Image: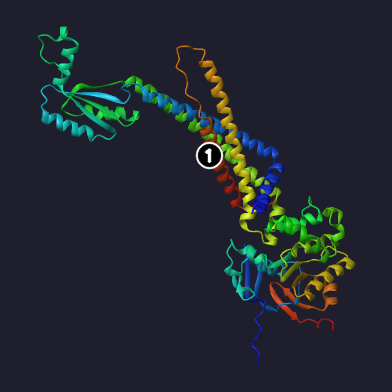
Amino acid sequence: MSAPVEPYIAFKDVHVQYPDHVTGLAGVSFEIQKGEFVFFVGKTGAGKSTIIRLLTREVRPTQGTVSINGKSLREYSERSVHLLRRTMGVVPQDFALLPRKRVWENVAYAMRAVGRSRREVRQLVPDILDRVSIAHRADAFPHQLSGGEQQRVAIARALINNPPLLIADEPTGNLDPGHSWEIIEILQGLNMRGTTVLVASHDMAVVERLKARVITIEAGLIASDIPSGVLNA
Amino acid sequence: MLDRIGFIVGEAFIAIRRNPSMAFAAITTAAIAMFLLGGLGYVYFRVTEYAATLPGKMEMQVFLRDGADFTMVKAVAAQIRAVPGVREVSWIPRAKRWEKEQRERPELTIGIENPFPEAFKVIVRQLADTDSVAERIRGMAEVDAGGVVYLQKEQRFIEESTRVLRWLGGTVGGLLMLTAGVLIYNGIRLTALSRRLEVRVMRLVGASRLTIDLPFLIEGILQGGIGGVFAAGLLFTCNLYLNRFLATFDALPQSPTFPIVLILGALAGVGAGYGLVCSWLAIRMPVKA
């Protein structure tokens, strides 16, 4: 009999209570294995973003534990939380691109911020931009890009630490269906190369098309957890 | 390492370039505050130094009642030594004093009995202690009424001058320093506001707290430090013109050399330290747009 595989990400009875008695999560438990592609779906305010913020340690659980790779996130202090964040790439909903910097500078800036030298930046940026098919717009400013292109830059920036985990918050929220699918394909490509991908979304068209695992959150609780390949199979 | 320092310092300069008017206001206010504090401090130092050169400035003479014997002299000397603020007590024997007087003024002393009482020379630790020490000694039964003599008026004048300087420097300079601190604080808060997207990106990708905070701290250090350098420059210029003016009066002694390096280092250091504290306070609280 083989030993049980330790989950890559584990939420155990996680509660999050925000100030003014606002409930973020009300007892959520799930496990995610390395290399999975998981969608978190649900209405606005259901708790999807809280799950992402728990993983990036922007929020701490009021009760329960969140662990990545067997290590509880409580073990990270304020001074060491950056080490956790270097093990994941985060793509925020609003892209968070620096408007006065060109595409390549946006990626370079993030690399410089985590201590990469100018030389490393020069060597690595073209490759990273190429991985998300945005190298041809390297000298453009964010306002000169389409929504899909801006999203690619945000993904490129999330890849600077070569993370084993990629978290995207509503990556297709502001995109038309064509561009949405292009972004999902990029994420799928990264997943196929071994990156665990977590996507918070309420774009059901994309979710249903990909047939990945789907965890539905409703009012801070897991309403359903459908394994990959099952949805609309 | 140099590459890393280059990035962090570059970030600090970008921040200053984005908020030039605020940075200018903070630097000039810090400069004026430190000019006043440094200038008055320098004058205070000079006055105190001058006071130290005045003869008998911290010295008083104490005369005992007639008929005091050696035992009483010893006892009173011990009592005076025990008074807080007294640095030194030396006995002036009446016989020796009389001998000296007879030597120096024989025509006035012939046929007269020694009229001098036993006396002490008392030196106090600080000018400010003189009155309280004199008061305590006057209260001793063995001391003659009116037997404590010192340059009370002169000492009071010097003490009053240094007190006014301290008060002026402390109040006006302190208020301006506080204003400069508020300006540096607000400047850093504004920088944090204008750089909130960069900070967010840094946090997202896992930049260390030091990498995020250092540019703000460097900005504060630069503002305070540059203010200090300007203050030293202003002081140097004022001192130069004052000396040129004073040189026109032949009777006045030549002023000592202005310690420019010391003052430049001290003011720049104090300014930088103050800027560091203000910027550290500014980044302790998160900035909300």
**Amino acid, disc 1:** Val
Q: Residue B197: x and y, percent?
A: 72, 54
Q: Does residue B7 sit above or below B103 in this rendering?
A: below
Marked residue chain, label 1: B
Looking at the image, which residue is at 70% across and 52% down? B196
Query: Which of the image's four quarters has the N terminus of chain A?
Result: bottom right
Q: Residue A66: x and y, percent?
A: 63, 73
Looking at this view, name the residue that lies furthest to the right: A178
Asked if residue B28 shows in the view, the reply is: yes
Looking at the image, which residue is at 69% across and 47% down? B10
Looking at the image, which residue is at 32% across and 30% down? B129
Looking at this view, name the residue that lies furthest to the bottom: A1
Q: Quadrant of residue A24?
A: bottom right
In-front residue for pair A114/B124: A114
The answer to whether residue B14 is left or right of residue A12 is right
The answer to whether residue B177 is left or right of residue A97 is left
Circle 1 SS class: helix
Colouring convention used in this rendered image of the protein: rainbow
Query: Which of the image's four quarters has the C terminus of chain A?
Result: bottom right
Q: Mark 1 highlights which residue?
A: B270
Q: Residue A156: x and y, percent?
A: 78, 63
In-front residue for pair A177/B102: B102
Q: Residue B86: x and y, percent?
A: 27, 32
